[in-house]
């Protein structure tokens, strides 16, 4: 069987895009409505996601879970696998039963997940909450993105996905800020706030009208009347999944998603342990910091206004995307989709090498900015690409497939990312080793609760926390974890380059 016959039903052509303002003006109210729904969902989602690692490693005495990074990795890996593989089938369900119905059901499930985290502050309670959030998100995404595909055209899709990604990141920006200030009150406040925020989507659903509903109902009528054959959902999904254009896509982009999720799962822990963010506040506001509540909120500072919290540092990512993604979308619309994604992957790799090379606060800021530019070049394009090549009637299904490489990459990173960090960069581990070297008995070291080893080291030695942080950082190869992650991304970049060349040949054959 020829390659072109295997790709039957998939339109691989690239359509010339409208200009920036023409594209924006061509977008209707349904596009902006689903953008608002995704924004609300992301505020709640990233309110938990951005601080999950900090919550997991925080000692029980401070309201955290007090678990090891290996146990945290088990939770994240399970979360990743469920959230990214469920859309393989929930996308097809959305195409058949309706987007509004699946969005409604997913919102209820996600509320249950946040409340479970608040009510059961334990490993298994957080695991159960994460599984509910994963299921809810896996059902939510295809309905939202399927709506977007039907509400846009091929000639405005590049700008539409860029703007959508930008709007989404307003939610990604606000969520961690909510978490920063809620968790300084108590950790359960984070989860209650997120449950309340996601509930706002019920109001959006009151004004939601599914595009293409008549065509969907007509297909269902023909199926019931025997005029049109519909395969079992799993078989239909499998027939599309085994097409080379989909299989190769999943394989080559999995490495990038390992890279991507390391930023959110592991970097906040790295910043909390090794990066002196007070340098940033001092540079901006002087030695005393700032007492402005407005600045403390929007910059993600602690309540004293003297340092940037880890979520606040990472929030630069969402802040840059929400203010400039449409400009990057306009720029990359001039290039082939796979070319833009390749350059985005290379920029992201460079950012991780920089994180490994130094723990200076302003260099970490630069690395996050580099990664954000790379993300803007690759992440919106994945949805545009799959939405464009999807056969009619299978848009949500294909946008569910987008999650598969994320599932492979995030699933592996969720398990191995925290383990790599624990092996090469864990301040908790190194503090325990140093306590033994300084003369504390092995039994006393073992008796220290998880998350409290460094504070005990400060007390035991009588030395300052900044001094001891520098001693531990210089004594160990902290950057190795980040170099390994960057190497995995490099393999993905090579794969994207080869995939782009192969896809170009297929496009020329199809023309």
Image (tube, helix red, strand yellow):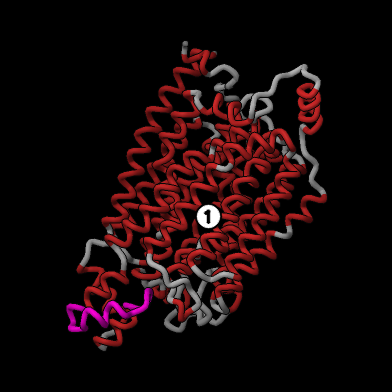
Please state if 418 lies on the left or on the right of 80 as rendered. Answer: left
Q: Which quadrant of the view contains residue 96?
A: top right
Residue 8, relative to residue 333: is it above or below?
above
- Residue at the location (37% across, 78% down)? 449
The C terminus appears in which quarter of the rendering? top right
Please state if 400 lies on the left or on the right of 363 as rendered. Answer: right
Residue 439, given in percent of the width and then of the height, sits at 18, 83
Residue 384, given in percent of the width and then of the height, sits at 58, 35
Residue 87, relative to residue 212: is it above or below?
below
- Front residue of 262/129: it is 129
- Residue at the location (41% across, 24% down)? 501
Asked whether the viewer can see residue 295, the reply is no
Residue 94, given in percent of the width and then of the height, sits at 69, 38
Q: Which quadrant of the view contains residue 292?
A: bottom right
Please state if 11 lies on the left or on the right of 462 as rendered. Answer: right
The kind of secondary structure element at disc 1 is helix
Q: Mark 1 points at which residue?
A: 320
**In this figure, what is the number of numbered marks?**
1
- Front residue of 217/459: it is 217
Residue 220, given in percent of the width and then of the height, sits at 77, 27
Alpha-carbon neighbours of circle 1 within 10 Å: few (<14), some, or many (≥20)?
A: some
- Whether 121 is among the magenta residues is no
Give the magenta-colored segment's residue range. 436-453
- Front residue of 432/131: it is 131
- Residue at the location (50% across, 69% down)? 122
Q: Which quadrant of the view contains residue 179?
A: bottom right
Please state if 215 lies on the left or on the right of 176 as rendered. Answer: right
- Residue at the location (43% across, 51% down)? 371
Asked whether the viewer can see residue 471, the reply is yes
């Amino acid at each position: 069987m020829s390659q072109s016959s295997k790709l039957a039903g998939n339109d691989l052509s690239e359509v010339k895009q409208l200009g920036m303002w023409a594209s924006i003006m061509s977008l209707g109210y349904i596009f902006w409505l689903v953008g608002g729904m995704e924004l609300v969902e992301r505020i709640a989602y990233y309110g938990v996601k951005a601080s999950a690692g900090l919550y997991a490693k925080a000692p029980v005495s401070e309201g955290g879970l007090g678990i090891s990074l290996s146990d945290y990795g088990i939770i994240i890996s399970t979360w990743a696998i469920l959230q990214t593989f469920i859309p393989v089938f929930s996308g097809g369900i959305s195409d058949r039963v309706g987007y509004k119905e699946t969005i409604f059901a997913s919102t209820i499930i996600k509320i249950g997940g946040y409340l479970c985290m608040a009510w059961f502050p334990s490993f298994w309670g957080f695991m159960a909450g994460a599984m509910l959030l994963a299921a809810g998100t896996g059902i939510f995404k295809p309905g939202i993105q399927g709506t977007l595909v039907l509400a846009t055209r091929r000639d405005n899709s590049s700008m539409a996905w860029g703007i959508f990604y930008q709007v989404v990141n307003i939610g990604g920006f606000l969520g961690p800020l909510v978490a920063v200030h809620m968790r300084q009150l108590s950790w359960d406040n984070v989860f209650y706030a997120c449950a309340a925020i996601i509930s706002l989507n019920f109001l959006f659903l009151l004004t939601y009208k599914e595009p293409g509903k008549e065509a969907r109902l007509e297909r269902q009528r023909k199926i019931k009347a025997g005029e049109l054959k519909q395969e079992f959902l799993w078989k239909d999904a499998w027939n599309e999944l085994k097409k080379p254009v989909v299989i190769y896509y999943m394989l080559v982009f999995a490495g990038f998603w390992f890279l991507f999720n390391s930023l959110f799962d592991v970097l906040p822990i790295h910043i909390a342990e090794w990066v002196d963010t007070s340098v940033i506040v001092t540079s901006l506001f002087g030695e005393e910091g700032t007492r402005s509540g407005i600045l403390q909120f929007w910059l993600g500072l602690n309540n004293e206004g003297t340092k940037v919290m880890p979520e606040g540092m990472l929030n630069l990512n969402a802040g840059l995307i929400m203010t400039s993604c449409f400009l990057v979308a306009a720029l990359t619309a001039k290039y082939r989709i796979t070319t833009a994604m390749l350059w985005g992957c290379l920029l992201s790799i460079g950012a991780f090498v920089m994180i490994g090379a130094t723990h200076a606060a302003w260099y970490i800021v630069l690395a996050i900015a580099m990664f954000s530019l790379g993300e803007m070049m690759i992440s919106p394009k994945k949805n545009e690409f799959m939405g464009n090549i999807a056969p009619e009637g299978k848009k949500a299904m294909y946008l569910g497939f987008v999650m598969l490489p994320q599932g492979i990459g995030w699933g592996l990173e969720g398990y191995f990312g925290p383990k790599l960090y624990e092996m090469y960069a864990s301040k908790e581990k190194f503090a325990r080793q140093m306590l033994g070297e300084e003369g504390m008995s092995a039994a006393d070291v073992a008796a220290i609760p998880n998350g409290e080893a460094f504070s005990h080291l400060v007390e035991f030695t009588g030395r300052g926390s900044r001094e001891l942080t520098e001693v531990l950082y210089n004594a160990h190869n902290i950057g190795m974890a980040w170099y390994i992650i960057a190497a995995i991304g490099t393999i993905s970049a090579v794969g994207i380059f080869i995939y782009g060349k192969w896809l170009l040949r297929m496009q020329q054959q199809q023309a």
